[in-house]
Image (tube, helix red, strand yellow):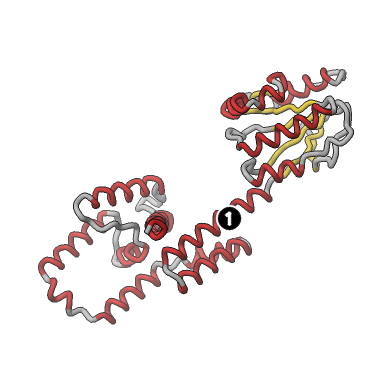
Amino acid sequence: MLLPAISLALIGLIQGAGVSQGIPNPDGKFPDVSRDFLGQGAGNVAAAFVGGVPAGGSISGTAVLMGAGAQSRLANIFAGVAVAFIMLVAGPLVEKVPMPALAALLIVAGFQGLRIEQARLIWNTGRVPTVVMTITFVATLIVSLQYAVLLGIVLSIMVYVFNQSNKVVVTELVLQPQGYPIEQPAPAALTGDKLTVLMIYGSLFFAGARSLEDQLPDVGAAERAAVALVLRGESDLSSTFMGVLQRYTKTLQARDGRLMLVGVEESAYMQLAKTGVLNLIGAENVFRSQPQIGAALNSAVASAQQWLGQATTV
């Protein structure tokens, strides 16, 4: 029962999110999905204490209300009161409504609930989103709805992890005597007695950290090589990335090299300290983020050039 229960809960949340993001408020703004989830959960918990039936956002019901001319969320309350009144007063008459009429109503509601523009947008976005959408749609026609939705969620998570791991890019910032640095592809191998500044783009979690490790320049036989990794904006570092830092630092230190971390946020600095990576790299080689763009990098360059015995030109 646990898996179907989770699947049904996800369906309710997805339908609620679909209504929230598909139909704006009267002021033209879309509601906060998190608050919608909170309200939906609180309502279902409260309903459980009085024998109520769990419910979620209804795309088809919303489409019917909008088609009838609803202007605000009060329409849901009035609709509920009207249905309760009809059931109490005219229940026997409602039983005589032919099933084909109800089927036609569901068809109209389903058609009005279609999001053709969103589907076209997904179709034109790329092949991967199109495949995920198509598989999920076909699954809803073959298996139970809750399992089809669960399949779509699993596929989306897998695609997200795959994309994030493939989006990690490492580039080199070539410092200039005057003006801004020049960005170019990272070198395949390091050069001894030289500072190499590396810029990282993409997620550093899970497979992304592994992809980063594959793109870092090979230390090889380079002696006294200094590498500066710019981490500005990375406020949360994964354990996988910590392992990458440990291995790369030890490889550099085996050749009398030096790894420097530049633009480290306060939360990331605390992670480095708690995991022991800060002691391995050396606190003097970690340059915290500063409000001025480039200030931390300037400090790192000055430190590296002093260590390499070069004239400081910052």
Quadrant assignment for the C terminus: top right
Q: Residue type at mark 1: give it.
A: Met
Q: Identify the residue shown where x is 81% and y is 32%.
A: 196
Instruction: Provide the residue designation for mark 1.
Output: 158
Rendering coords of residue 224 (x, y %): 86, 26
Q: Is residue 46 left or right of residue 130?
A: left
Q: Can you say whether 62 is above or below 172 in the image? A: below
Residue under the image location 68 percent in, 20 percent down: 283
Asked whether 57 or 204 is in front, the reply is: 204
Crowding at dot 1, Cα within 10 Å, few <14 / some 14-19 / many 20+, comes out as few
Q: What residue occupies the far front of the structure in this picture?
A: 1
> Left or right: where does residue 145 sit relative to residue 256?
left
Whether residue 214 is visible, yes or no, is yes
Residue at the image position 76 percent from the left and 43 percent from the top: 215
Asked which quadrant contains residue 24, the reply is: bottom left
Tell me if residue 232 comes above or below residue 132 in the rendering: above
Q: Is 93 placed left or right of 11 in the picture?
A: left
On the question of residue 16 being in view, the answer is: no
| 20 to 264, vertically: above or below | below
Quadrant for the N terminus, please. Answer: bottom left
What x and y, as percent, mark residue 297?
72, 26
Horizontal placement of 153 versus 37: left or right? Answer: right
Which of the pair 295/256 is nearer the observer? 256
Q: Quadrant of residue 72?
A: bottom left
Instruction: Determine the image quadrant of residue 310.
Output: top right
Residue 179 in the image: state x and y as whole percent: 79, 30
Residue 75 percent across, percent down from the top left: 26, 58
Identify the residue shown where x is 37% and y is 45%. 35
In the depicted view, which residue is nearer to us: 266 or 279?
279
* Secondary structure state at the residue bearing disc 1: helix
The mark tally for this picture is: 1
